[in-house]
Image: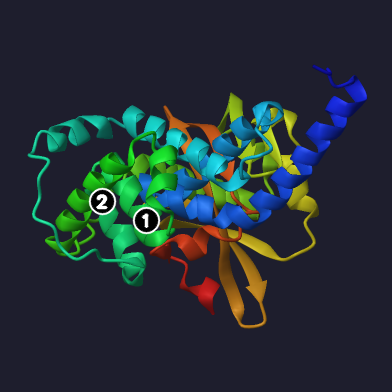
Amino acid sequence: MDIPSEKDARGIFEARYLAFLETITHLRPSLHRYCSRMTGSVLDGEDIVQDALFQAYRKLDTFDDDRPLAPWLFRIAHNRCIDFLRRREVRVEAETDAMTPDFVKPVDPPGPALGRAVEQLVLTLPPKERACVLLKDVFDYTLEEIAELVDSTVGGVKAALNRGRSKLAALPEPPKSPRETNPELSHLLHLYVERFNRRDWDGLRDLISADARLRVADKFEGRLDESPYFGNYDRWSVPWQLAVGEVDGEPAIIILGRTPSGWIPKSAVRLEVVDQQIVRVLDLLHCSWILSAASSVVIADSPEYYA
């Protein structure tokens, strides 16, 4: 068997990398949509997509070129979602639900026409049923493709679809319960926004832990103090402002851009806080699809931004 030369191996990887970039350019919004519906959060969804794409890039040299890239990327993203749900202890709920009988009276499938309603209601399902309903009724994957993505059999996928669809058919759309407001977090968010809008970078650093992490989606991953983060915003020629708000009920910072008709939401920033210190910043400025995927975006106490 011929062993590829170093030059040939480099060429193979470069071809795979170009195909990888082309695929994620078109697939990225769909990956985010899937991860968001699996986790119940458009912010968590994008965080998971970032992790999945990084993991995929690291494994790219082992990818089989005879297979399509999209299902492979979906499977990596799916596995990251399951890991996330387990860490969030949703697994306990899933195991409790799994103790119910496998047989459920069949009903007509809801099908893709239900669109966003299905995407919101699937959050009531255990992870496997949630994944199967999303992949079939929203993303229109075949049973065989779904079985490979969720590491199951066609029979297992059919059973999960039947259970999930039956539960959805019997379930009224749940009212969204407001999340409890954390006064300390709210105060810190307002301080962060006020100082950021004044370009008070030294004042901002007082709110941030010395070893805080930064992720600017698709641009930077590492320690915040080793990044040009604040300088980039300072030099940004496009008019911008930050505002405290909520994305799907989750406290967040909204990035606003100015248009001829006024300030409009463009993207979001999530702060992770421990002991009143910011320990991680997730900036989604370059992910234009984030807010359009959310069910609700609220700007708190700032009606003038819509003027």
What residue appears at the point 55 percent right and 51 percent down from the top-left corner?
Answer: 193
- Percent position (x, y) of residue 180? 26, 48
Give the residue furthest to the bottom. Answer: 261
The foreground one among 83 and 208 is 83
Q: Is residue 62 above or below residue 113?
A: above
Q: Is residue 225 above or below residue 203?
A: above
Q: In which image quadrant can residue 221 be found?
A: top right
Q: Count the numbered circles shown.
A: 2
Secondary structure of the residue carrying numbered label 1: helix
The answer to whether the residues at label 1 and label 2 have Cβ atoms under 8 Å apart is yes
Q: In the rendered image, is residue 61 in sight?
A: yes
Q: Quadrant of the C terminus?
A: bottom right
Q: Quadrant of the N terminus?
A: top right
Q: Residue 161, which numbered label?
A: 2
In the image, what residue type sits under mark 2?
A: Leu
Secondary structure of the residue carrying numbered label 2: helix
Q: Determine crowd level at label 2: few under 14, some 14-19, many 20+ residues with C-alpha closer than 10 A.
A: many
Q: Is residue 295 left or right of residue 307?
A: left
What residue appears at the point 48 percent right and 50 percent down from the top-left corner?
Answer: 190
The foreground one among 209 and 78 is 78
What residue appears at the point 74 percent right and 34 percent down from the top-left corner?
Answer: 227
The foreground one among 14 and 224 is 14
In the image, what residue type sits under mark 1?
A: Lys
Q: Residue 136, which numbered label?
A: 1
What residue appears at the point 24 percent right and 63 percent down from the top-left corner?
Answer: 109
Q: In which image quadrant can residue 136 be found?
A: bottom left
Q: Determine crowd level at label 1: few under 14, some 14-19, many 20+ residues with C-alpha closer than 10 A.
A: some
Q: In which image quadrant can residue 183 be found?
A: top left
Give whichever of discs 1 and 2 has the lower sequence position: 1
